[in-house]
Amino acid sequence: MADTITIRSDSETEHALDVLTHDGSSRSAAIRQAVLEAAQRKERAAAMRRAVLRMPLGDPDGIDVATEIARDREDDGR
């Protein structure tokens, strides 16, 4: 048997539950589905971050960004 979870809701949460149960779903089913979907989104976001960090950076283009920014600031000060 699954554990019971208790939440304290506020007006924003109650509105969200009204939206999620508008189709006749029970509050319990709506909350369970919302938790599962939130976990899936977090897992997908983490997987995308890992994929981006594994991407090759390619060859340097020879531009020193810090030098370019400093040069632009000097030009603006004139």
Image (tube, grey):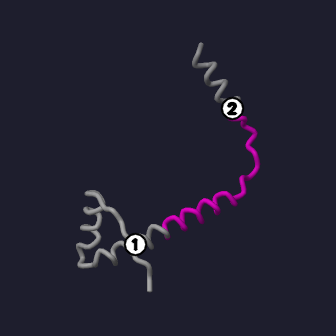
Q: Nearer the viewer, residue 52 or 45?
A: 45
Report the predominant secondary structure element of the magenta stretch.
helix
Q: Quadrant location of the C terminus? A: top right
Q: Residue 53 carries which label?
A: none
Direction bottom: furthest residue: 1
Q: From the top left corner, tell me how far across and down residue 68 is, in percent.
A: 67, 30
Kind of residue at disc 2: Ala
The image quadrant that residue 21 belongs to is: bottom left
Q: Residues within 10 Å of mark 2 (few under 14, many from 20)?
A: few
Question: Judging from the image, what secondary structure is the residue with disc 1 in?
Answer: loop
- Which residue is drawn at the image coordinates 45% and 67% (left, top)? 38
Q: How crowded is mark 1: few (under 14 residues within 10 Å), some or many (20 or more)?
A: few
First to last magenta residue range: 40-66
**Label 2 sits on residue:** 66
Placement of 1 over or under 34, stated as above or below: below
Q: Which of marks 2 and 1 is in front?
A: 1
